[in-house]
Image (cartoon, helix red, strand yellow):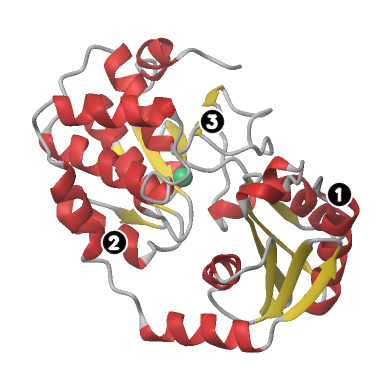
Amino acid sequence: MEIRDSEFKSCIRKYNDVLYLCHKNADPDAIGSGFALQQAFGGSLGVAEDLSRTGSTLSKAIGAEIILNPRVENYDFVVVVDASVRLQLGAVRLKNYAVVDHHLDDGLLASAEFHIQRPSSSTAEIVWSIIRGSNIVPTREMVLGLLVGMISDSGRFRRANPQSFRTAAELLETGMAEYDEAVAVLSRMPTEISQRIAVLKAASRAEVVRQDDWLIVTTEINAFEGSAAMGLVDIGADVALAAGKHGSSARVSGRANREAARAGLDLAGVMRQVAKAHGGEGGGHRAAAAMEAGGEPAELLDECRKKVAEILQPRQA
Ligand SMILES: [Mn+2]
């Protein structure tokens, strides 16, 4: 059941012991959003598997107490934050739960008790609207966490819309945190050398296919697929797909530039379809998506590339 932001408070009040659960490899948007909800409405904050490096930097900055791999059966109710597919939650088995998220996926929605999901540039924006709609007085840590989540998920506002700027302005108008401070938290985030090496290797192994004026780039790398795909778009790809092997399954991450997304490409849809055909799961956003399924990276990469190529029509002069 879809609910309005202002209805969250009365829906969550029915439960005594709520766990706000962030997706695996939790990023600043998930941590900032989960933390703010937990502080506003009470309960515990948990993360499936582990935090990302940036997520853990934020959690230290705001003093979040996080339970890694919480036993969900110990709680009355779970609110999944910043994710809508099961794959993002690792081995966690959900029973009674709700979803608060900004992705395009719907895997978790049908069985949820209630959900709030809309395509916004971050989950933090949605959470701020829930908090305001519930007349809750925020703390400095909540404001800082949401601000960092927003800045990080919107690519420092490069993927922001007018509403994102309005939300950021409201957060700043509380007078509790400065923009400067939020950016400083983000710049404390380490750029790991292994990540940079992975991205450079991905670039050196990249295969470039030109279709009309579109450049579709694929590469294989066994870690940091998302960063690799993002790096390839930064240096000129219209669409980049990076795949890697993880145990018996393969992971593919895709990124597209603004032109490709405007031309109708929906990477979340592509990933979902290819993953489904291989018994896996996939999704995300139009311009940033990922999938995981059984099979060989090269094979999945090829299927994703073909689907992308089918969708991209010659550009108008
Ligand atoms: Mn997010």
The quadrant of the image that shows the N terminus is top right
Q: On the rendered structure, is 219 left or right of 64?
A: right
Q: Could you say whether the residue bearing mark 3 is in a helix, strand or loop?
A: loop
Query: Which quadrant of the figure has residue 225?
Result: bottom right
Q: On the rendered structure, is 191 left or right of 121?
A: left
Q: Is residue 207 visible?
A: yes
**Residue hosting label 2:** 56
Q: Nearer the viewer, residue 250 or 237?
A: 237
**Residue hosting label 1:** 311
On residue 96, the disc is 3
Give the image location of residue 78, x and y in percent: 45, 35
Who's the residue at 42% across and 31% down the image?
76
Q: Amino acid at mark 2?
A: Ser
Query: Which quadrant of the figure has residue 316?
Result: top right
Who's the residue at 41% across and 63% down the image?
50
Q: Nearer the viewer, residue 311 or 68?
A: 311
